[in-house]
Image (cartoon, rainbow, N blue to C red):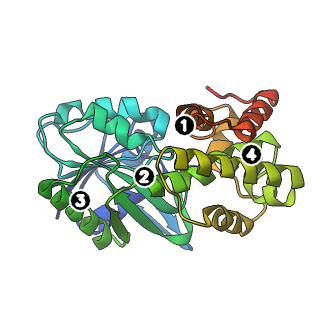
Amino acid sequence: MSRFVIIGAGAIGSFLSARLHEAGHDILLVARGERLEMLQAEGVRLLEGKTDRQVRVPVSGACDPGASPDHVILATKTFQLESALELLEPLNEARFTLLTVQNGVEAPKIAQAALPRTEVLGARMHGFFELEEGIVRHTGVPATLIAGQVADRATAPASAAGAASLAGDLRVASIPTKLVPDMRPALWDKFMMAATIGGVAPAFGLNVGEVLAHPQASALLRDAMTEVVQVAAALAIDLPSGCIAEKLEFIARFPPGVTSSLQRDLESGRPSEFAHLTGAIPRFARQAGLPCPAADDVIARLRARGLRLD
């Protein structure tokens, strides 16, 4: 079995640590503040379907420099990446495979720049996860994961072995994992939905599950998605054919009360991933030399509502 360090004890980090610990892996979950105290007292409380259980995962406020991991998973939000990477400084001499599971498309490159000797894999986690009142709720579809490199270089044999080992460990923990040679299309495919619906819904004061029933919001969502696809193509990233229709069909199945994590953070005034999601669309559009009037409209509406966008 492998040794894991998981930094970030939100919904996904806690879920992964519990599943991997139950599968027999050596886990250290790194958390801070009240969340650390709660985990030390109660372990990870995990609700899957109607099954509620507590998993006593080893937890700490820092990495152990004397215990080199085989794999590290960064499970913080994107705006917390810098502080998460600082927590890895005691492991600078260790060799491990690092997996990023953040929203957006930039986390793997940020991690790779900070840890140039480390093999970094970007990942896309599929499933619905929420952390509410200390309980991790996993509902809906089974958890699955896609992972792969984002750098423009061939995978070396050693790194290929590390990626295969990581994927195998996740599969043992009942998290089906697929490795791909280039993770960028999958990251942009998810970004295309998260960055648009996550901004459009609060821009109109709607829940995510209400957007498609609102003619103006629905039209703006489609236009914003189209812009992201065009920007990706200009940056030589080909998204799957029909991805917009697929995402709209997926959103159409949401109950009316569903919200996104970005929306919840924006509307509560908490720090958010806005700069790496909705706010990143104009930045990528400028890089591609393209206009993005729909994204600009969404951002203007968010500002008009007085939402915190820093």
Q: Upstream in the sequence, badge 1 or badge 2?
A: 2
CA distance for labels 3 and 2: 16 Å
Helix, strand or loop under label 3: helix
Residue 264 appears left or right of 205: left
Nearest to viewer (mark 4 / mark 2): 2
Q: Relative to 109, does residue 172 appear above or below in the rendering?
A: below
Residue 92 location, x and y as percent?
17, 33
User: Residue under circle 2?
Assistant: 184
Of residues 274 and 138, which is closer to you in this image?
274
Which residue appears at 23% of the width and 67% of the height?
Answer: 24
Helix, strand or loop under label 1: helix
Nearest to viewer (mark 1 / mark 2): 1
User: Residue under circle 4?
Assistant: 200
Which residue appears at 17% of the width and 52% of the height?
Answer: 70
* Three-letter residue code for mark 4: Val
* Three-letter residue code for mark 1: Ala
Q: Upstream in the sequence, badge 3 or badge 2?
A: 3
Residue 251 appears left or right of 231: right
Helix, strand or loop under label 4: helix
Q: Relative to 153, does residue 112 appear above or below in the rendering?
A: above
Nearest to viewer (mark 3 / mark 2): 2
Nearest to viewer (mark 1 / mark 4): 1
Q: Residues within 10 Å of mark 2 (few under 14, many from 20)?
A: many
Residue 109 appears left or right of 244: left
* Three-letter residue code for mark 3: Ala
Which residue appears at 22% of the width and 64% of the height?
Answer: 164
Residue 33 appears in which quarter of the rendering?
top left
Can residue 55 be seen in the rendering of this structure? no
Q: Are marks 1 and 4 in contact (CB under 8 Å)?
A: no
User: Residue under circle 1?
Assistant: 288
User: Residue under circle 3?
Assistant: 163
